[in-house]
Amino acid sequence: MLLVGELINSSRKKIEQAIKDQDVNYIQEIAKEQFENGADYIDVNAGTFVGQEGSYMNWLVNTVQETVDAPCCIDSPDPQVVEDAMKLHKGIPMVNSISLEKERFDALMPVVSGNDCKVIALCMSDEGMPETADDRVAIAEDLVNKLVQKNVPIENIYVDPLVQPISTNDNYGKEFLSAIEQIMTKLPGVHTMCGLSNISYGLPHRALMNQAFMIMAISKGLDGAIVNPLDKRMMASITAAETLAGRDTFCMNYLDAYRNGKLEL
Ligand code: THG
């Protein structure tokens, strides 16, 4: 399972303040903690800073890369911000994200084509947010076909079917889960990825909902996620669910996690 640490995001008050203060130590501490607790990529997002997003994004990439060996996941809806950050990133970053929205697609396609980076393909089009599993699968098929045609290896594509709050529509959970299952079976070789925490928006005890949903999504084939690696319960749930889903030969990862104290909550 590919894990992206979500904590360096300016929508979080402490991070927003640290970016404003150009507090290198705080950002580096959060980057290190996430890496040490299992993040394969460190998400960087400065999206709340209108007009300054680009310069803050570049500063985040430099600051994170100075201190951890994990690459960044460059998280912005603005293709120019993504392109500029990719240029100064050392090694190969992850792009978060391309979508079927025409402007975004046309601007990012040349950037990801012929580059060995992993790409998150967000199930969003100019018609807006998908409602049903069928909407998501149709966008995913179109987007993946277009990316593959432009020489992006299918193994580098992580489709994000887009999680929406269960508090706004009883069906959003099952539509998402069905989309994961269909995308993983209809597009062999592709990966899936998502930020799960939207599912619990507006509800109490969000961590409980997020964990239950993660386990259900893993059972449908989800093999990537944007998570808080410092959430021990979530990380233990992921380890257990992967083993139960048949993705852990001889339960080796589960036993390793146990021996390393990662299952103590
Ligand atoms: N898909 C893709 N990228 C994404 C998302 C996605 N990037 C952003 C987001 N969704 C995932 N990242 C975060 C980062 C932080 C938090 C949630 C998701 C977070 N949320 C807490 C909350 O909502 O309660 C606390 C906020 C706070 O501390 O102020 O921390 O879906 N491709």
Image (cartoon, rainbow, N blue to C red):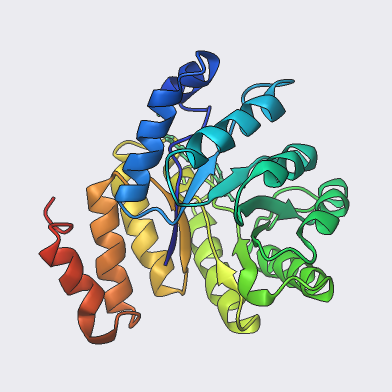
Residue 256, quarter of the rendered image: bottom left
Residue 126 seen anywhere in this rendered image of the structure: no
Would you place residue 250 above or below residue 181 in this image? below
Horizontal side of residue 159 vs 27, given as left or right: right
Question: At 68% across and 40% down in the image, what residue appears?
Answer: 85
Query: Residue 139, position in %: x, y?
Result: 74, 64
Horizontal side of residue 15 vs 241, given as left or right: right
87 or 156, nearer to the observer:
87
Residue 7 seen anywhere in this rendered image of the structure: yes
Question: At 32% across and 57% down in the image, what residue appears?
Answer: 212
Horizontal side of residue 162 vs 113, given as left or right: left
Would you place residue 207 above or below residue 248 in this image? above
The quarter in which the N terminus is drawn is bottom left
206 or 24, nearer to the observer:
24
Query: Residue 37, position in %: x, y?
Result: 30, 50
Horizontal side of residue 94 vs 232, given as left or right: right
Question: At 32% across and 36% down in the image, what residue appears?
Answer: 204
Question: At 71% across and 63% down in the image, what residue appears?
Answer: 135
Query: Residue 206, position in %: x, y?
Result: 34, 41
235 or 140, nearer to the observer:
235
Query: Residue 16, position in %: x, y?
Result: 50, 21
193 or 202, nearer to the observer:
193
